[in-house]
Amino acid sequence: MKHPFHAVAIDGPSGAGKSSLARRAAAQLHFLYVDTGAIYRSIAWYALQKKVPLEQADAIAALLPEIHVEISYGADGLQHMLIDGEDITAEIRRPEVSAAASKVAAVPAVRAYLLEMQRRLALENNVIMDGRDIGTVVLPEADCKIFLTASDHVRAQRRCRELADRGTPVDYETVLEDMRRRDEQDRTRAVAPLQQAEDAVLLDTSAMNFEQSAAALVQIIEEKLAHEA
C-alpha cells in the first residue's frame, strides 16, 4: 500500500539556507517543517551546559538517557526546541552551539537516539525535513530529495546577516572560517557524512536571492510530487 504521506528531504552544508527556504516551502505547500539540525543543536547545547568535553563520544552518549528533548509547533507555526520543558530555540543558534553541533552529530549514539524521532514525524505527517543526511540515511525513500548549496563565501555572508539580525553579530572572516571547518567535519565524519544522494536534485542558490531560491525549491518539489502521484 502506498504511504499516505509525502516526505521531502533537503540536505546541504551549513549556511545554505536550508532552514529558511524549507520553512517557506512547507508553509506554501502546507507540509510540516522539520529542522533536524535544530535537534542536534539542542543536544550540543545540553552538552555545553553540562561542560562535557565534545571530543569524548562516550561522555556525550552517557548524557542521552537524561535528556528530554521535544519538538513543538507554536501559534507562530515555527518549530521550537525544548529540553526539560525549557524553550532553547534562540540559544541553539549561537555560534558556539553551531560549532559544537557538528561534533555531537558525529557521535553514533546521538544519531541512533534521534533517528526514530525524525522518522516518526515523517510517518505521521507530510514533511519537509532538512539536515545533512536526510536523503541518504534518515529518509532514504523520500518522495523528493534536494541537495541545497551555495558557495562558501555566499553562505558566510548570509550567515553574518542572519546573526546580525538576531542581535549576535560575528565578523565575516570568523564566520567563514567556522563554516569551512564545519563543512570539513560534516563531509569527513565516519557516521552519515554530508553527501548528495544519488537521486537528489542539486539546487545551487549562489546567484539567487531568497525569493528566487524559494520559488526554485517549490518548483522542484511540486514537479517531483506530481511525478510520484
Image: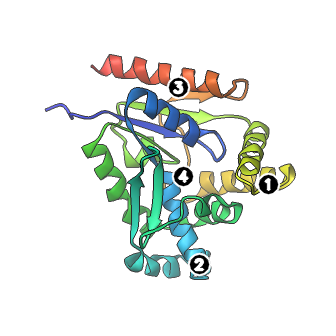
In the picture, the disc for residue 193 is: 4
- Locate residue 202 relative to residue 156 in the image: left or right: left
Which numbered disc flags the more N-terminal residue, 1 or 4? 1
The label shown at residue 49 is 2
Q: Which mark is residue 169?
A: 1
Regarding residue 199, the answer to whether it shows in the image is: no
- Could you tell me which residue is drawn at 67 percent across and 61 percent down? 94
Mark sitting earlier along the chain (2/1):
2
- Under tag 4, what secondary structure? loop
Q: Dot 1 surroundings within 10 Å: few (below 14), some, or many (20 or more)? A: some
Q: Nearer the viewer, mark 1 or mark 3?
A: 1
- Real-space Cα distance between discs 1 and 4? 29 Å
- Give the numbered dot on residue 217: 3
Mark 2 Cα shell of 10 Å, populated few (<14), some (14-19), many (≥20):
few
Where residue 135 appears, as percent x and y from the top left, is 43, 41
Front one among 113 and 162: 162
Q: Secondary structure at mark 1?
A: loop
Q: How many marks?
A: 4
Q: Is residue 149 left or right of residue 3?
A: right
Residue 12 vertical position relative to residue 211 in the rendered view, above or below:
below
Q: Nearer the viewer, mark 2 or mark 1?
A: 1
Colour basis: rainbow
Q: Check disc 2 and report its element: helix, strand or loop.
A: helix
Quadrant occupied by the N terminus:
top left
| Mark before the other along the chain sequence, 1 or 3 | 1
In the rendering, at what x and y percent does residue 156 appear? 76, 44
